[in-house]
């Protein structure tokens, strides 16, 4: 997988080189480039934003630097890139979307700041490449950078060959549609708190049942929206 990120804060992505993504890059499974939007400005102040037409608070990112930056990435389409603009107005990012995106060969992320990017950038991009607005949740961020780091962490670990043991991908939380069961390790008793007896029993069937019930109870309590309708607790 190849990805490109356009941002006014390239340093935000320095963390990508540590842990899993860094290892994937060194191993050749994943490659990426981070592009500074301001490299595509031509005024002395390297201006990327301006006041909104129609009035209102905040600033909007001007289209010209975006046009240039995206031209440089999209102009020789040897592959079929998917462009993602993180936005609170987008479709919600889920594990299912992460899995879908992990099968792409080329992702391009455009990180908006301020009140967003001039809509014509999105429209113009959509006319030449597959383009999606994606939100990581209903809260206010200062820009798309943190959203892209979160999405990449979820996506890249699903790229074949990135996570060493594919089994560790299967059992995890959202993949099964329920929240993860609680985990324990040594010591057997800590500050007077024991590990649940069943986990020490060696009875694999009993352990699997206990874990499933714990997952179900946790999900009912904190995320009933994840349960199929027939398992939703009555109000
Ligand atoms: C939010 O992806 N997001 O969720 C996002 C991107 C940019 C700004 C935002 O406030 N929520």
Image: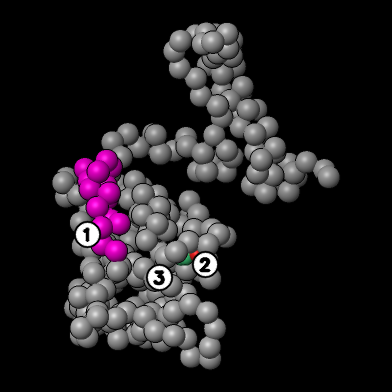
Residue 151 percent location from the top left of the image: 40, 55
Q: Quadrant of residue 179?
A: top right
Report the residue marked by disc 3. 113
Q: Is residue 155 visible?
A: no
Above/below status of 164 relative to 131: above
The magenta span reads 9-23
Q: Earlier in the sequence, mark 1 or mark 3?
A: 1
**Disc 1 and disc 2: Cα gap in Å?**
25 Å
Say if the magenta span includes residue 42: no
- From the image, tell me which residue sits under label 1: 32
Mark 2 C-beta closer than 8 Å to ligand 1: yes
Q: Is residue 45 visible?
A: yes
Secondary structure of the residue carrying tag 1 is strand
Q: Give the color scheme: rainbow, by chain, secondary structure or one colour.
A: one colour
Relative side of 127 to 33, left or right: right
Exactly how many numbered labels are in the figure?
3
Farthest bottom residue in view: 54
- Determine whether label 1 and label 3 are within 8 Å by CB: no
Which is more toward the observer, 68 or 132? Answer: 68
The disc, 2 or 3, on the residue closer to the chain's N-terminal end is: 2
In this figure, which residue is indicated by the disc labeled 2? 88
Percent position of residue 93, x then y:
49, 58
């Amino acid at each position: 997988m190849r990805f490109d990120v356009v941002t006014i804060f390239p340093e935000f992505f320095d963390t990508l080189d540590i842990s899993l993504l860094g290892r994937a890059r060194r191993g050749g499974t994943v490659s990426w480039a981070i592009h500074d939007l301001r490299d595509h400005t031509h005024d002395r102040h390297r201006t990327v934003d301006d006041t909104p037409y129609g009035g209102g608070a905040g600033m909007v990112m001007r289209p010209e630097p975006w046009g240039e930056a995206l031209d440089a990435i999209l102009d020789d389409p040897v592959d079929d890139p998917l462009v993602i603009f993180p936005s609170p107005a987008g479709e919600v990012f889920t594990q299912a979307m992460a899995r879908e995106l992990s099968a792409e060969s080329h992702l391009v992320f455009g990180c908006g700041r301020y009140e967003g990017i001039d809509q014509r950038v999105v429209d113009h991009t959509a006319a030449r490449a597959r383009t999606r607005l994606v939100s990581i949740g209903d809260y206010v961020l200062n820009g798309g950078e943190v959203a892209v780091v979160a999405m990449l962490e979820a996506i890249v670990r699903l790229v074949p060959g990135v996570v060493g043991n594919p089994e560790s991908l299967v059992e995890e939380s959202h993949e099964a549609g329920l929240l993860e069961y609680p985990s324990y390790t040594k010591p057997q008793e800590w500050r007077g708190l024991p590990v649940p007896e069943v986990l020490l029993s060696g009875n694999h069937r009993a352990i699997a049942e206990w874990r499933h019930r714990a997952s179900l109870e946790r999900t009912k309590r904190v995320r009933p929206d994840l349960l199929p309708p027939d398992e939703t607790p009555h109000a």
